[in-house]
Structures are given as structure tokens and as C-alpha cells.
């Protein structure tokens, strides 16, 4: 069951982690080599105290995800939109190959800040800005990203920088929830980016 997480306004805690898949090998001289395979973001989210109805909406959605089997989208609370003043449509202005750590773009107007999350319209991977940048609305500007591009972008690829949707799957099975003597509920989920 895919879909969009119903409400991210009820999270009180967000833990945002950078995880990397690597493989380690040794050569004939027993020298250890580590090769980077893939990067993912992980989120650990804890809810505020919820009414039973609020819990039902969120927990019902989570239960339908079939544990780790399904993916869904969630906008990371508190960090899912730019810290800067960027507005308008930002579009890449050249083809950029897989493995590059920057793209050039035009359009929009304002600033992006280091640490902002962005997504390119032609794939689901989320990137983090590694430097501040400014657009005057007409001159090409550079967007520095981490990790490197996982899919090439072209001169028609647009950039999402507000309410950035992250495609994720649960880490582990459906979580438990807690209740208190006042009939309020709290739950937590851990998710990992999938792309």
C-alpha cells in the first residue's frame, strides 16, 4: 500500500541520519579497501500526544504499509522546506551526468541555504545542499548537492525545494503505540529513504 503519510504536523521529535552502504575487501597484501555503494537518509519520528482519532489516522496508515514491504511518501517535518527565500520555478539548465556534485539552474528568485533538502522532478532521490546559493531570477546559478547525482538531470528537470516529498519504507515492522491515564496516545516510526 503506497500513498502519502496523512499528517506530519503531529511529530515532536525528528532524528535525521545519513547512512551509507559500503562493501569492504582486502587485496593480496591484506590492504583493506572500502567501496561506497549507496547513500540513504533515515528518519526517526516521535509523535506528540494524540487523541484516539489522531492516532487512528496515522497508525491505520502505518499498519497498511505491510511492514517494510511498501513505500510511501512523507515530507520530513521541520526540514522539508528551504530555510532560504527562494520562490518560483527553478529548472536545471543543462544535462548533468550521474556522479556529479553540482548542477546549474535558472529561474526562481532568492536564496537556498546549506542543509536545505531538494528533489529533482525526474527521480525520487533527496539531496542536501552543501553550500548556500542565490538566484536573481535570470542568471544561471550553481546548486551544490550531497550525495552526488544518482540519476542524470536534463535542462527540463525542475527542482522541488518546499514540502519535499521523501519516498520511504518502514525500518522494522509496524511499531507499537503507548497510551496514558488521560486517554492520549504516542507512537514512533523509523523510516529509510528508498529510491
Image: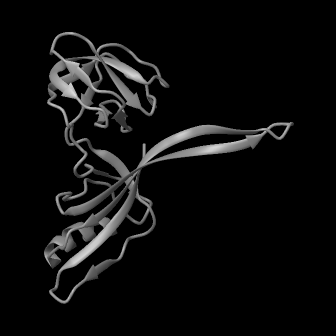
Q: Position of residue 87 (x, y in %)?
A: 13, 28
Residue 70 in the image: above or below residue 82:
below
Q: Quadrant of residue 28?
A: top right
Considering every residue shown, the one lying at the far top of the view is: 139
Does residue 74 lie above or below 136 as drawn? Answer: below
Q: Nearer the viewer, residue 111 or 165?
A: 111
Foreground residue among 107 and 115: 115
Image point 27% across, 61% down: which residue? Answer: 13
Residue 84, percent across and down? 18, 32
Residue 170 visible in image: yes
Which residue corresponds to the image point at 31% horizontal and 61% vertical from the top-left?
45
Rendered-image quadrant of the C terminus: top left
Res 147 quadrant in image: top left
136 left or right, relative to 149: left
Q: Quadrant of residue 69?
A: bottom left
The residue at 35%/36% (across/down) is 128
Circle count = 0
User: Which coloring applies here?
Assistant: one colour
Looking at this view, name the residue that lies furthest to the bottom. 181
Q: Is residue 20 left or right of residue 178?
A: right
x, y percent for residue 22: 61, 44
* Closer to us: 194 or 83: 83
Residue 61 visible here: no
Residue at the spot 16% in from the left edge and 28% down from the top edge: 86
Residue 187 spot, x, y in % from top left: 29, 72
Q: Would you place residue 192 above or below residue 176 in this image?
A: above
The quadrant of the rendering that contains the N terminus is bottom left
Amino acid at each position: 500500500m503506497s500513498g502519502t503519510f496523512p499528517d506530519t504536523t503531529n511529530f515532536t521529535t525528528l532524528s535525521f541520519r545519513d547512512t551509507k552502504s559500503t562493501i569492504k575487501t582486502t587485496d593480496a597484501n591484506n590492504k583493506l579497501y572500502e567501496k561506497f555503494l549507496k547513500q540513504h537518509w533515515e528518519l526517526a519520528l516521535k509523535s506528540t500526544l494524540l487523541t484516539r482519532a489522531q492516532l487512528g489516522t496515522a497508525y491505520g496508515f502505518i499498519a497498511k504499509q505491510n511492514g517494510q514491504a511498501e513505500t510511501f511518501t512523507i515530507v520530513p517535518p521541520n526540514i522539508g522546506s528551504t530555510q532560504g527565500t527562494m520562490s518560483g520555478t527553478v529548472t536545471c539548465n543543462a544535462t548533468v551526468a550521474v556522479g556529479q556534485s553540482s548542477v546549474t539552474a535558472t529561474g526562481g528568485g532568492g536564496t537556498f541555504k546549506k542543509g536545505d533538502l531538494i528533489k529533482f522532478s525526474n527521480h525520487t532521490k533527496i539531496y542536501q545542499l552543501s553550500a548556500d546559493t542565490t538566484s536573481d531570477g535570470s542568471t544561471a546559478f550553481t546548486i551544490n548537492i550531497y550525495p552526488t547525482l544518482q540519476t542524470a538531470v536534463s535542462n527540463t528537470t525542475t527542482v522541488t525545494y518546499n514540502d519535499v516529498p521523501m519516498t520511504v519504507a518502514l525500518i522494522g515492522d509496524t511499531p507499537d503505540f503507548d497510551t496514558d491515564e488521560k486517554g492520549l496516545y504516542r507512537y514512533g516510526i523509523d523510516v529509510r529513504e528508498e529510491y
